[in-house]
Image: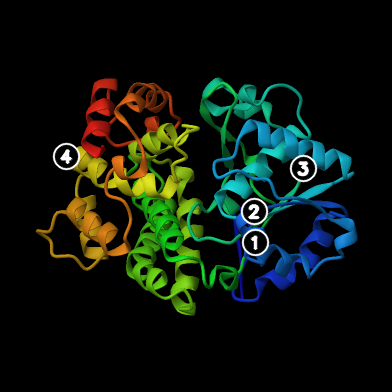
């Protein structure tokens, strides 16, 4: 079992969940708020994790929506305070983990959440008072368990990132056992999220060789194992590799993401339809790869080599073939996105925090063209 000291402490391997009581003790958490969602609860995974704890000391909050909202954060804060909690356990995919970070912030910091958004200068306003979080992923995608930020849909209709070193979970417990049997579509969608993190981080023009090395390692794992994990939920090797790819994607994206995520964040802010972040990344990735092609030097050649593709193969077309093999949507229209959603999505994409680190920064007109191409 590996213990990785990079940004935060990660306990990683099959059976890692058994370390939870020790990690709670190490952090001095006596009365945790247990944040999860209905799907994790209904699948029996929450009960499996809770079986390792004295449940009389745990307050459960299982009302995380698919895309975490400011309203859900405020409800979580009420549960945190009513339970006399002194820390948080987050169990699930990116939504419960992001929600837990929002609760950890809002329970210890006054004022509207919008004040703490990165694009509004909120990074410096987030202090070490943030409640400690232990993050336990049940999917292999967002890597939020080792990320320094949280994405929340605010009541004003925006989807904003709250980013701070103080938002890193104090511990990440990554147990691939918890992902065995994850449904194929969710496995594929979250896996594409991990792959996109790795690719966009590598393509970011910022200089950070360690992050690029991690991103390339994660991209290779994701590319090689995502189909196996999707086709056979009990494939232990594939599940281990995909969880590591997701972890590496988030460790690396401290370097910055790009226009795929600008668009995904913007489209994901819609309250209706509710759009899955990983699926959105899959739809947008080929379009942005084509858009960036003349602005990344020889990096596409490196990716083709990494993925064992012929050097003359179009990388974007290869991603499309992968999406088809995984049964993921290829267009926004398949997901319920419509013409009337374009204008607001462009506005939000232009303001997104991922824009400064994209190889080629789109104009509003170019974002509109990209959305229409993806529709």
| Disc 3/disc 2 C-alpha distance (Å) | 23 Å
The quadrant holding residue 111 is top right
User: 166 or 291, which lies in front?
Assistant: 291
| Disc 1/disc 3 C-alpha distance (Å) | 27 Å
What crowding class fits label 2: few (fewer than 14 Cα within 10 Å), some (14-19), or many (20 or more)? some
What crowding class fits label 4: few (fewer than 14 Cα within 10 Å), some (14-19), or many (20 or more)? few
Q: Where is residue 105 in the image (x, y as percent from the top left)?
A: 71, 35
Q: What element carries label 1?
A: helix
Residue indicated by mark 4: 294
Q: Is residue 118 left or right of residue 263?
A: right
| Mark 4 or 1: the one toward you | 1
Q: Where is residue 162 in the image (x, y as percent from the top left)?
A: 59, 33
User: Disc 3 or 2, which lies upstream in sequence?
Assistant: 2
| Disc 4/disc 3 C-alpha distance (Å) | 44 Å
User: Disc 4 or 2, which lies upstream in sequence?
Assistant: 2
Residue indicated by mark 2: 38
Q: What element carries label 4?
A: helix
| Mark 4 or 3: the one toward you | 3
Q: What element carries label 3?
A: loop
Please name the residue shown 42% across and 25% down the image: 348
Q: Where is residue 342 in the image (x, y as percent from the top left)?
A: 32, 26
Q: What element carries label 2?
A: helix
Please name the residue shown 19% across and 54% down the image: 315
User: Disc 1 or 3, which lies upstream in sequence?
Assistant: 1
Residue indicated by mark 3: 131
Tags 1 and 2 touching, CB below 8 Å: yes
Please name the residue shown 34% across and 51% down the image: 199
Residue indicated by mark 1: 42
């Amino acid at each position: 079992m590996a213990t990785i000291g990079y940004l935060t402490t990660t306990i990683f391997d099959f059976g890692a969940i058994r370390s939870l009581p020790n990690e709670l003790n190490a952090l001095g958490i006596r009365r945790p708020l247990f944040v999860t969602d209905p799907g994790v609860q209904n699948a029996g995974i929450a009960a499996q994790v809770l079986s390792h704890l004295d449940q009389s000391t745990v307050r459960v909050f299982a009302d995380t929506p698919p895309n975490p909202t400011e309203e859900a954060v405020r409800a979580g804060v009420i549960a945190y305070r009513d339970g006399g909690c002194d820390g948080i356990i987050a169990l699930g995919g990116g939504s419960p983990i992001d929600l837990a970070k929002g609760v950890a912030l809002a329970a210890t910091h006054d004022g509207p959440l919008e004040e703490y958004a990165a694009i509004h200068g909120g990074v410096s306003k987030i202090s070490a008072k943030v409640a400690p979080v232990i993050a336990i992923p049940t999917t292999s995608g967002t890597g939020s368990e080792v990320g320094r930020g949280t994405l929340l849909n605010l009541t004003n209709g925006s989807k904003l990132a709250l980013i701070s070193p103080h938002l890193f979970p104090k511990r990440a417990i990554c147990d691939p056992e918890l992902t065995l049997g994850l449904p194929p579509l969710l496995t594929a969608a979250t896996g594409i999220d991990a792959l996109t993190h790795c690719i966009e981080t590598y393509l970011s023009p910022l200089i950070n060789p360690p992050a690029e090395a991690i991103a390339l390692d994660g991209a290779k794992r994701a590319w090689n194992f995502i189909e196996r994990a999707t086709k056979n939920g009990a494939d232990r090797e594939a599940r281990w590799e995909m969880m590591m790819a997701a972890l590496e994607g988030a460790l690396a994206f401290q370097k910055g993401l790009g226009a795929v995520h600008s668009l995904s964040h913007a489209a994901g802010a819609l309250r209706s339809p509710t759009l899955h972040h990983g699926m959105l990344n899959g739809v947008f990735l080929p379009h942005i790869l084509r858009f960036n092609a003349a602005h990344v030097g020889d990096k596409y050649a490196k990716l083709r080599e990494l993925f064992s593709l012929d050097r003359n193969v179009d990388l974007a077309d290869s991603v499309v073939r992968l999406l088809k093999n995984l049964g993921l949507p290829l267009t926004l229209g398949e997901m319920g996105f419509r013409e009337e959603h374009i204008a607001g999505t462009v506005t939000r994409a232009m303001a997104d925090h991922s824009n400064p680190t994209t190889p080629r920064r789109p104009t509003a007109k170019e974002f509109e063209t990209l959305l229409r191409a993806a529709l």
